[in-house]
Amino acid sequence: MWDANTGEHILSFIGHRDDINEVSFSRDGKILATASDDNTVGLWDVNTGEWVASLQGHSNNVHSVSFSSDGTVIASGSYRVGNTLCFWEPRTRERINTITSDQDDIAHIHSVASLPNGSIFATGSWGKICLWEGRTGKLLITCEAEESIGEIWAVVFSPDGKTLATGIENNAILINDVSTGLLLKTIHTKEPITSLTYSPDGNTLISVGKEGTINFWDVDTYNVKKTITDFSFQVFSIAYAPDGSSLVTGNMSKISFWNPKTGELQKTLVGPIGSVSSVTFSADGKILASADFNLARLWDVETGRFLGSFKGHTNLVRSVAFSPDGSMLASGSQDNTIGLWEIRSGERNVIGERLDTIVGHTDDVHYVTFSPDSNTIVSASDDNTIRLWDVETGNLINTLVEHTRAVHTVVFSPDGNTFASASRDGKVCLWDFNTHELLNTFRGHTRNSISVDFSPDGNVLTSSSGDAIYFWDLSTGDHINTFTGHTTMINSVVYSPDGETVASGSTDGTILLWDLTKLVSDR
């Protein structure tokens, strides 16, 4: 928590076991409610920062939470399979009502908002905007919307309580009449809307787009009064060029090439770039692949020219990987599938055919990688599994079940005999590629583990957990060292080809280079 006037850090609220997705103050400002991926709602004393209570009743990630304006009800919504909408009594902390996922009105709840007067809440879910009475759990109104609006990422009432603004996945803001649910206005935007708020006087609606653009809308005309686009964005992915000459970062608006020795920006790729979740080089370093939205894109490294896109996924692409022989690209997506694509070598148009769609995971595919011989794909998924696939046939070879939460990363050792996996359960596992046996489990991370990489000599395993980097001796399994320096979660760690540097990219918007010869960080 921060002082709004001075920017001074006041308190930290520590107690959740996983990411916090949303916070909400009580009307009197004494209690803070937090929605977390650990499936709970936390209640905290604002003055002391102490944990007051844990509201337990959701069976999956809690994505949204809000106090009613009269302070008598807390509403919380969960996301993914088994989603529920729960209403709680703040004083007794008892659950008043639960709306279950057998009602499609609450599928994938991203956002909950409270009406300025009373105990009425709005929920934004998959394709539906609903108004509920919190004390009874009664569905009051399903708001009118255009067809195929997709996921709803933000809902907010105007200060006078007469209209509801909704930010949707399909590049628009919807304005509905609260009393009737009728659609009054559709504001078309250039990107999905992830957050909305009104100015206190109600004259301005402020929207935040997925690519970071903030627009200030005049409520009378719904014309843009002001736009802000200059930000330091979260770093989602990093990759070294095979020769070590460049470090590439992907964030919410661009792909940047950096000199890893000086930290200077070499160039920025310009093109149809969204939120870049993955970047990777071909083995010869001539082509860069990136993932954003539901596309995998290819770029000429030397010229920065956009070569084209692989299209076919129906949801966000989370990871891309070249086959070592350079003939294929694999993509893992939130549509639960793996795409396998042909790369045409020696031709101006390198974008080839879709070779296969590999189906089998039951949740988002977070990461894909090829075995050194290009014959096997290993994938990591939100369904808590690691799966091995035959590239030629697309058939499942084996499913590895060891992690208890989403698996974020799988990386092969330099000799290809083992691979490591990093999971939100806080464990990093080492596997034998030939036998598929679990060789070792590295414990000691204080938070979930997102990224992992092997040193080029294969002697050390490096993993990220929260804002820290851990180093492990592979011969003994011992913890060697921990580096800290980021202020928020690290999304990616990668070794330089010479093994002398580790680069880390974080949601704090920075890339840190760590000198392993001196164990000193350079920012």
Image (cartoon, grey):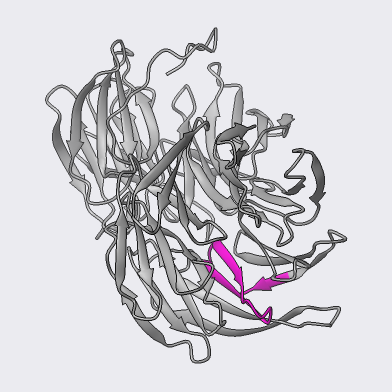
- Membership of 379 in magenta stretch: no
Q: Is residue 313 visible?
A: no
| Residue 320, position as x, y percentages in the image | 59, 66
| Residue 504, position as x, y percentages in the image | 57, 44
- Residue depicted at x 23% and y 28%: 73
Q: Is residue 101 visible?
A: yes
Extent of the magenta region? 309-332
Q: Is residue 153 above or below residue 318?
A: above
Q: Is residue 280 above or below residue 37?
A: below
Q: Compare residues 203 and 400 and report the one nearer the observer.
A: 400
Which quadrant of the figure contains the C terminus?
Answer: top right
Quadrant of the image occupied by residue 285: bottom right
Q: Compare residues 378 and 56 and report the one nearer the observer.
A: 378
Left or right placement of residue 450 versus residue 257 in this view: left
- Residue depicted at x 50% and y 62%: 458
Q: Is residue 118 above or below residue 39?
A: above
Q: Compare residues 482 and 308 and report the one nearer the observer.
A: 482
- Membership of 320 in magenta stretch: yes
| Residue 496, position as x, y percentages in the image | 64, 53
